[in-house]
Amino acid sequence: MVKACSDDLRQRVVAAVEEGATVRSAASRFGVAVSSVVKWHQLFRRSGSIRPVSTGGRRGSVLEGERDFIVGRVAEQSDVTVRGLRDELAARGVNVSHNAVWLFLRREGMTHKKRPAGSGALQT
């Protein structure tokens, strides 16, 4: 991932634009892209700061709001499948992949146990 430009450079570029330089001339003068100058100046006008916004981090699961339902269903019917849970969630208006359900269950500490007959069962 590309490292953010220094605050010093951002400050000098924004100051040049604030003093009347065009975006293109400021970009040429400081050796940065025109799009960067535009974004930095917009950020400065909007927030008063030139600091880059933090990037990355873990996003929350779409299924966090459905935690009680999922845990309740697993407690109620321990042999419910991941795909079955996905279909029940879709009926509730929450459209996710079976992988999203599986990842959620794994984070919650619920494991998938195979049965001899081949049907899967979720355990807490």
Image: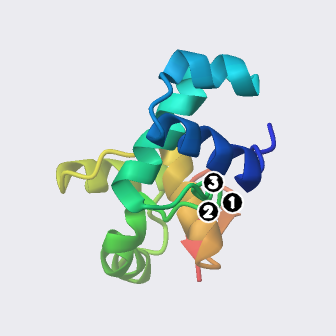
- Per the rendering, the mark at residue 92 is none
Q: In what quadrant of the picture does the N terminus appear?
A: top right
Q: Earlier in the sequence, mark 1 or mark 2?
A: 2
Colouring rule applied to residues: rainbow
Task: Tell me the residue that label 3 is attached to.
Answer: 55
Mark 1: give few (<14), some (14-19) or many (20+) Cα within 10 Å: few
Task: Tell me the residue that label 1 is attached to.
Answer: 114
Rendered position, 29 above or below 38: above
Q: Position of residue 52 (x, y in %)?
A: 61, 54
User: Disc 1, disc 3: CB below 8 Å?
Assistant: no
The answer to whether 122 appears left or right of 72 in the picture is: right
C-alpha gap between disc 1 and disc 3:
40 Å
Task: Tell me the residue that label 2 is attached to.
Answer: 58
Q: Position of residue 103 (x, y in %)?
A: 60, 59
Residue 51 can be seen in this image: yes
Q: In what quadrant of the picture does the C terminus appear?
A: bottom right
Given the image, on which type of amino acid does mark 1 rest?
Answer: Lys
Q: Earlier in the sequence, mark 1 or mark 3?
A: 3
Given the image, on which type of amino acid does mark 3 rest?
Answer: Thr
